[in-house]
Amino acid sequence: MMWQAAKRVIEKIEQAGFEAVFVGGVVRDFIIGKQSNDVDVATSALPAEVKAIFQQTIDVGIEHGTVLVLDEGEPIEVTTYRTDGLYTDHRRPDEVQFVRTLAEDLARRDFTMNAMAMTHTGKIIDLYNGQQDIQHKVIRAVGHAERRFQEDALRMIRAIRFSAQLGFTIEPDTMAAIKSLAQQIQYVAKERIHAEFNKMWVSPFPAQGIAMLEQTTLSNYLQGSFTASDWNQFQTDNQLVGWAYFYILNEEESFFAYYKCSNKEKVFAKQVAQAYRRLHEGWQVLDYFYYALEVLEAAYDIALWRGDNIAFSKQEIVANKTALPIATIQQLAISGHDLMQWSQAKGGAWLKEALHAALLAVLTKQVENNKDQLKEWFHDIYQG
């Protein structure tokens, strides 16, 4: 759908007398044979000229030449060909200059596999032998590698992330440039590093990525332990699990703030760490009740990745969780008000203890989750 929408956008720009092509990751993925989620269009038309062609546009980054076109049912980013000025913050160019030729635009891109373009008819424009590098499974900087990384230091981690995603090696000169400039990763916003790690956690070859962080010495300038051997068995399709595992390997509270982790990531990682520790003691019925299935399964996987001896299967986690008489505390048939009414006593610390005992009695199937039966249990067993 998005591909077809982008193709219609390109055709309309060409009908208006300008040049427009697919660029970047979508071309790389097309050549690899992989479906791409992002489809970007580059054009010789200036932002104002793009806006004049279409009825519905949004200025999402117009200072850098990007206009979001909404005319074709899918949002398509259209960016004017440009060259970049100095990157004094190691992140964004201080200024950009719009140009009319595709060759000038491709020259500023990071890696040869990302520096290709394709017309809407399928013709590949490959000025830096990106197709050959893809065929040889090599990640190579466009032009002078050190210059590319000095422009944007995050490109060093991007090279490694692509290696983890694609199983490619990094070309020697590009690798040497990363080693030479590794300390500049300190200038990169942690949110951007976080985004790259998100992609590396769910990549096919995360251990390869971690190993390259060590080999390039980038790991020396990042918080946390990056021991490649710890990651040999790691494999997940859930980014949250990646952060949980990384946290367990480090157990450092400042880790979350350093990497700008979300509250969801922080809570999940801490719960998995708790469940992992309790797994070594043996999970009890309350563990199955209080921890989400996703947390229990992540803790189990981490135990396997770390070579721990686990005496039960992952399928048993689901079975034990499903077998619980109730799934949430709200489903308990009684409340604190019931206990106070039955005991004729005021609230206090005893109330929390009694409710916990009632919950445990229900979960261990000592009593059914029935108000009358729980009342009898309370009088005859708990109070008695």
Image (cartoon, rainbow, N blue to C red):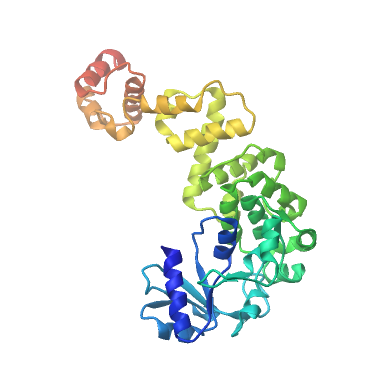
Q: Residue at x 44, y 34 (%)?
A: 291
Direction from residue 31 to residue 179 in the image, left or right = right
Q: Position of residue 172 (x, y in %)?
A: 79, 58
Q: Is residue 289 visible?
A: yes
Residue 163's place in the image compared with 317, above or below, is: below
Direction from residue 169 to residue 8 in the image, left or right = left
- Work out which quarter of the rendered image holds the N terminus and state it: bottom left
Direction from residue 212 to residue 78 in the image, left or right = left
Which picture quadrant has residue 99?
bottom right
Q: Is residue 94 visible?
A: no
Q: Residue at x 71, y 43 (%)?
A: 227
Q: Position of residue 78 (x, y in %)?
A: 49, 75
Which picture quadrant has residue 5?
bottom left
Q: Position of residue 151 (x, y in %)?
A: 69, 72
Residue 323's place in the image compared with 142, above or below, is: above
Direction from residue 130 to residue 284 in the image, left or right = left
